[in-house]
Amino acid sequence: MSALFISDLHLCEERPATTRAFFAFLAGPGREARALYILGDLFEYWVGDDDAEAPFNERVTAALAALAATGVKVYLLVGNRDFLIGEAFAQRAGLHLLADPTLIELGEQPALLTHGDLLCTDDRAYQEYRAQVRDPAWQRAFLERPLAERKHIVEELRRRSEAAKRDKGTDIMDVNAGAVEALLREWDYPALIHGHTHRPGHHVHEADGHACERWVLSDWDADAPYLAWTPSGFAPRRFGAATNGDTGEIQ
């Protein structure tokens, strides 16, 4: 009876080794779990569920659906790259979409799940951008554009994002301690699990006299990093490289 947590895979055709590792992970540790929680940025980008039939996206969707067909509960909480994933994709992939944040129970341990970008409050420019693109009216207008135009817009946004990161200090892109403690207080001091920052680790926050664990998930590579929960507690693990060579087609 285990639960597995992953995030920040950024799957795309340009990262075949990571994608192969993901498929191997789903066929390995994924099938031994009770539940798999994907906490955002499953894809490098997502321009709408009408792109789900693209060959690469279809392979990822089919792999998730195959895992769900074994009885493993698969949950997805969208991130800052794939926030346009909707119910149509969820149904095709056999998974359940979660709100950000979502509180779950792991045995007697409450755990709060979030992608993590909401906690990076020192990056005000990003928070303004996030508020804009998460607005339902903005999303409706964007999804009404032709698919090719949406892909072009997203490519430009990715380029600007990478350029902006180079001009920002590393601390500004990390979580704000006050924002973390406020969230823990709001949800009655659970454990907190998130990704986004690409700074994997284990922290303990003292919030109003409560010692709350915070687990930061690793971004993905061919080593397939994940966080496992069993009745014994949390443990970070790596499934190991699962590639058919360093380059080439995804198998």
Image (spheres, rainbow, N blue to C red):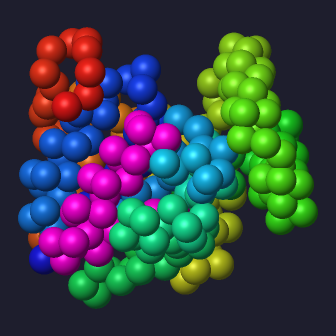
Quadrant where the C terminus is found in the figure:
top left
Whether residue 235 appears in this view of the structure is: no
Please state the extent of the stretch shown in magenta in the rendering. 54-77
Write the residue at 43% across / 65% down. 92
Does the magenta segment cover residue 89?
no
- Name above or below for residue 229 compared with residue 248: below
The picture places residue 207, in percent across and down from the top left corner, at 56, 68
Q: Quadrant of residue 124?
A: top right
Pick the front one: 27 or 198 = 27
Does the magenta segment cover residue 58?
yes
Write the residue at 66% across / 44% down. 47
Q: Quadrant of residue 46?
A: top right
Write the residue at 71% across / 19% down. 159
**Magenta stretch secondary structure, dominant:** helix
Whether residue 33 appears in this view of the structure is: yes
Side of 70 relative to 199 (left or right) = left
The picture places residue 148, in percent across and down from the top left corner, at 72, 33
Quadrant where the N terminus is found in the figure:
bottom left
Pick the front one: 234 or 143 = 143
